[in-house]
Image (cartoon, rainbow, N blue to C red):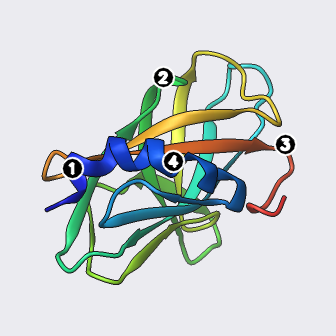
């Protein structure tokens, strides 16, 4: 698996890709359209979204993530029952097949940022690191959009 060793280097080399909304953290895993919403203070958890694409030829397993913005960061899956009541639970390990994209998108999944260490302010961005089962780490800068944003275009 090539992405572990090269992820930090790729992150540095590809920093200008931020402007286009694309972020290639490694040869194998590409994170695109990362975004989050501004928070009201730090008393409630924040949420972030992104698309994680496996551009490699072997399956990869996303096992978790972390950020210095939050004490605990988890990927949650959202389910809606027969009565239209939605609830969320940790998504667990997510296997991404070669060529497949996992959308961490509103109504489906979110990155839940619990115990925020500082407010999420519109116009700023914060670093998030995705962890994979082979030990690889993919750093992702996440832009903070407005408090009512619904997607990466705002
Ligand atoms: Cu959640």
Instruction: State the mark number for residue 89.
Output: none
Counting other residues with Cα less than 10 Å from the Cα at mark 4, is it few (<14), some (14-19), or many (20 or more)? many
- Residue sitting at x 56%, y 78%: 82
Horizontal and vertical percent position of residue 18 = 64, 51
Neighbourhood count class around disc 2 (C-alpha, 10 Å): few under 14, some 14–19, many 20 upward: some
Q: Are marks 4 and 3 in contact (CB under 8 Å)?
A: no
Marks 1 and 2, the one that precedes in the sequence: 1
> Nearer the N terminus, badge 4 or badge 1?
1
| Whole-number angstrom distance, CA of label 4 to CA of label 1 | 22 Å
Q: Nearer the viewer, mark 2 or mark 3?
A: 2
Task: Identify whether 41 is placed above or below 28.
Answer: above
In the rendered image, the vertical position of residue 149 relative to residue 44, given as above or below:
below
Which comes sooner in the sequence, label 2 or label 3?
2
| Residue wearing tag 3 | 147
| Of marks 1 and 3, the one in the foreground | 1
What whole-number distance in Å separates the C-alpha atoms at marks 2 and 3?
21 Å
Task: Classify residue 65 as left or right of residue 105.
Answer: left
Label 1 and label 2: CA atoms lie apart by 20 Å
Q: Is mark 3 on a helix, strand or loop?
A: loop
Mark 3, Cα crowd under 10 Å, few <14 / some 14-19 / many 20+, is some
Asked whether mark 2 lies closer than 8 Å to ligand 1, one says: no
Q: Which circle's residue, 4 or 3, is located before the other in the chain? A: 4
Q: Tag 4's secondary structure? A: strand
In this rendered view, identify the residue nearer to me: 79 or 139: 139
Res. 71 in view: yes
Mark 4 sits on what residue? 111
> In this rendering, is residue 139 above or below 14?
above
Q: Nearer the viewer, mark 4 or mark 1?
A: 1
Q: Residue 61 or 3: which is nearer the viewer?
A: 3
Q: Where is residue 1 in the image (x, y as percent from the top left)?
A: 13, 62
Q: Tag 3 or tag 1, which sits nearer the N-term?
A: 1
């Amino acid at each position: 698996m090539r992405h572990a060793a090269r992820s930090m280097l790729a992150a540095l080399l590809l920093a200008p890709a931020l402007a286009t909304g694309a972020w290639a953290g490694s040869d194998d895993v590409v994170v695109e359209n990362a975004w989050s919403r501004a928070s009201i203070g730090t008393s409630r958890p924040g949420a972030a979204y992104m698309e994680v694409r496996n551009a490699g030829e072997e399956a990869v397993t996303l096992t978790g993530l972390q950020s210095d913005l939050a004490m605990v960061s988890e990927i949650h899956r959202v389910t809606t029952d027969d009565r239209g009541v939605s609830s969320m639970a940790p998504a667990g390990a997510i296997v991404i097949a070669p060529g497949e994209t996992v959308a961490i998108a509103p109504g489906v999944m979110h990155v839940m940022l619990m115990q925020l260490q500082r407010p999420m302010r519109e116009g700023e961005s914060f670093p998030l690191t995705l962890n994979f089962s082979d030990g690889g780490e993919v750093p992702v800068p996440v832009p903070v959009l407005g408090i009512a944003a619904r997607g990466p275009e705002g």
